[in-house]
Image: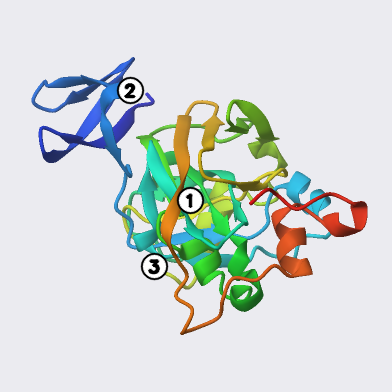
Amino acid sequence: MSAEYRRIVLDGAVVQVERHGDELVAGDGRRVKADDAVHLPPVEPSKIIAVHLNHRSRVEEFQTRLPAAPTYFHKPTSALNAHGGAVVRPAGCRYLNYEGEVAIVIGRTCRDVAPADADAYIAGYTIANDFGLHDFRDTDAGSMLRVKGSDTLAPLGPGLVTDWDFRGKRLRTYVNGTVVQDGSTDEMQWDMRYLVADIARTITLVPGDVLLSGTPAGSRPVRPGDLVEVSVEGLGTLRSHIVDGPAGIRAEVGAQPTESEEVRSTALGGDWELRGVRSPRR
C-alpha cells in the first residue's frame, strides 16, 4: 500500500512524518497541517544524477533526436532545496529555467542490476524541479555544473511516495497558475528501471540517492516574484518561488554569464531568434 513520508522542522528538530490527508503525523503522535509545515528535502542523497533528454516532446521541441543510450549530468547536493523554498536567480542573470520532473529515490545499495530487478532497489518517488541557469551554458555545456548545480537549483518534494506505479502518470508545471508544461511518463524513452540499471552498471547507488528522469517540452525562463509549481499524478505538488540574488557573479574570476545564440535558443526552447520571438524580460 502506498505511503508518503516527509522531512520537516517540527519544534526546532528535523522529524520524519507521514502524511495523513491534510496533516503530517510524527512517530510520537504530534500533528501539523501540511500547509503550515516547514519542509526539508524528503531525502538526503549522496548524489543527484539527471538524464539530459528522455521525453519525446522535449526532443521534438528542439528538433533533435535521442542518442542511442541516455546521457547524464550531476547536480551537487549543495543545490538541494525543499517544497516551499526560494530559488535564487543571481543578479545579472536572465535565463533561469524550470524543468518539472519525476525523481527516483534509491532504497537499497544498488550495483550491477538488471532493469527487470531494479524495482527492488527503489524506495519510492518524489517530484523535482531541475532548474537551470543557462547564462552559464556557454562555459559549462560539457559538465552543466553551474548551469544545473548552483545553489538552490534542486528542489525536491514535498514527500517520498512508496509503491507508486510510474506508468501513465500526468506531469504538469505551472507558473503563476498557468500551465506551461504538460506531459506524461509514457512519453519517456527510458523508464525508471532502465535508468537505475544503466547508472548502476558503473556507479554504486546508495540509499537516498536521487535520479532525475527528464522533463517534457515547455521549459522557459522565470523571474523573481514568480511561483512555480510542479504537479505529478499521485506524488502531489512541489512549490518554489523565485527571488533575486542580491549579489551578482564575482567579476574578477572565472567565466561570466553570457547571452549567446546558444544560451537564448536553449532557454527559449529552440532557435527563437530566427522566429522573431523576443528575449524574456529582465
Residue 254 in sight in this render: yes
Alpha-carbon span between mark 3 and mark 1? 15 Å
Of the residues shown, which amino acid type is indicated by label 1?
Answer: Asp
Label located before the other in sequence (3 or 1):
1
3D distance between C-alphas at marks 3 and 2: 36 Å
Q: Which mark is residue 204?
A: 3
- Dot 2 surroundings within 10 Å: few (below 14), some, or many (20 or more)? few
Q: Earlier in the sequence, mark 1 or mark 2?
A: 2
Question: In the rendering, at what x and y percent does residue 134 appear?
Answer: 62, 62
Residue 93 on image: x %, y %? 57, 61
- The residue indicated by pointer 1 is 117
Q: Nearer the viewer, mark 3 or mark 2?
A: 2
Q: How far is mark 1 from mark 2, CA to CA? A: 37 Å
Tell me the quarter of the image containing the N terminus. Answer: top left
The three-letter amino acid code for the residue at tag 2 is Asp
Secondary structure beneath disc 2? Answer: helix
Q: Is residue 32 above or below residue 180?
A: above
Q: In the shown orientation, is residue 200 left or right of residue 26?
A: right
Q: Foreground: 169 or 145?
A: 145
Whichever of callouts 3 and 2 sits on the residue coming sooner in the sequence is 2
Mark 2 — residue? 35
Position of 245 with respect to 69 (left or right) is left
Report the residue at 56% width, 69% height from top: 144
Mark 3, mark 1: which one is toward the viewer? 3
Give the crowd class for mark 1: few <14, some 14-19, many >=20 residues within 10 Å: few
